[in-house]
Image (cartoon, grey):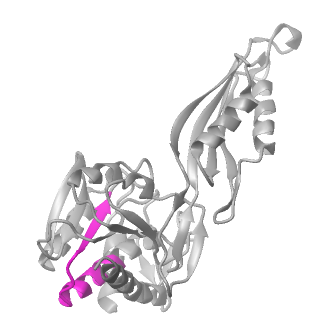
Amino acid sequence: MKSLFNLVRQLIDIPSVTGEEGLVGRFIADHLEKAGFLTTLQEVEKDRFNICARAHEEPVPQVVLCTHLDTVPPFYQSSEDELSIYGRGACDAKGIMAAMIVAAQRLKTECLGGVALLFVVGEELDSIGAKSANRLGIGSRYVVVGEPTNNELAVGHKGSFKFVLRAKGKSAHSAYPEFGDSAVERLMNTLNRIRSEDWGKSDVLGSATVNIGTLAGGVAANVVPAEAEARIFVRVVGEVSVVQSKLERLLGDDPNLGYEVISQNDAVFCKTLPGFETVSVSFGTDIPSLEDFGEPLLIGPGSIEDAHTDHEKIGKKELRESVEIYCRVVETLLRASG
């Protein structure tokens, strides 16, 4: 599997922080074309493009293997030891991408049709690549999305409800707070109610969680603040509409409280297969945006605990196993689709 490990390191060593995926995209397109794949580049924005590759001419593939080209910042180069490969994107998701490519090459050698590769931009920010990919007209029956799940099939993942909560008040001299109305205090009291609320439970995905990510308000310590806001992320275990209704009930009819939705999607439930270990995950994926790609499956090597860290890594043994797993998943799905 030396070629697999080399490919992982080559991919890691090409920076592709979200918005700057052009170089790695061109490298992958060239690599796939040299391997005999029919490759299409779909422009998403200037110097940002998705890559779709097929081994054969079939108009509609049954199974699409999909992961993302982009990484979070900051970029740092690859290294390796006897057990693991390190570097930005090692497990999220360049190791996964390399495993999918090697698996697709093997399936191509075995003359198994009905399989395509799809690599998209922007997963770490807004899923703009996945949303654009729906315009390719592929319409597959299954999409196997690669994210670090320790090579276990995910039964699903939590949805998201991201919003900005804003509070208004009235400024005054802090020595005479009775003449003002603190927006910060109004915001903090509301945040306490949000933290105490039960946002839902699922037998499959566990409990919903709330993260108050940022806080801002006021202009100086000696001024009663007239404005304040917080950015909040609820990991949803059911329908977003239920969460939104609870939020509106908490805010009540206070004219000095309001919110703006940044993004939202319901919890995701994925297809599983006999003979594969399963797990539920809390992180989000491109799945909600891949509307044209059929029933989703979610699996990949690596641990989410290593993703987005300064020690990001992927195990070599796990990488080797993931190639076999992707081949097994595809073969199982192709048999199921007749």
Give how far across and how far down residue 75 sits, in percent: 43, 61
Give how far across and how far down residue 220 sits, in percent: 73, 22
**Outermost front residue:** 338
Closest to the observer: 223 or 139?
A: 139
Closest to the observer: 149 or 203?
A: 203
Which quadrant of the rendered structure holds the N terminus? bottom left
Give how far across and how far down residue 286 sits, in percent: 42, 57
Give how far across and how far down residue 45 sits, in percent: 25, 45
Left or right: 63 in relation to 191: left
Magenta segment boundaries in residue numbering: 99-120
Which quadrant of the rendered structure holds the C terminus? bottom left
261 vs 104: above or below: above
Closest to the observer: 297 or 81?
A: 297
**Outermost top residue:** 179
Q: Is residue 199 visible?
A: yes
Q: Residue at x 57, y 42 (%)?
A: 162
76 vs 111: above or below: above
188 vs 235: above or below: above
Q: Is residue 47 visible?
A: no
Q: Is residue 190 magenta?
A: no
Q: Quadrant of residue 144?
A: bottom left
Q: Residue at x 29, y 49 (%)?
A: 132
Q: Residue at x 84, y 7 (%)?
A: 179
Left or right: 188 in relation to 156: right
298 vs 138: above or below: below
Instruction: Count every numbered label the image shows and give the total.
Output: 0
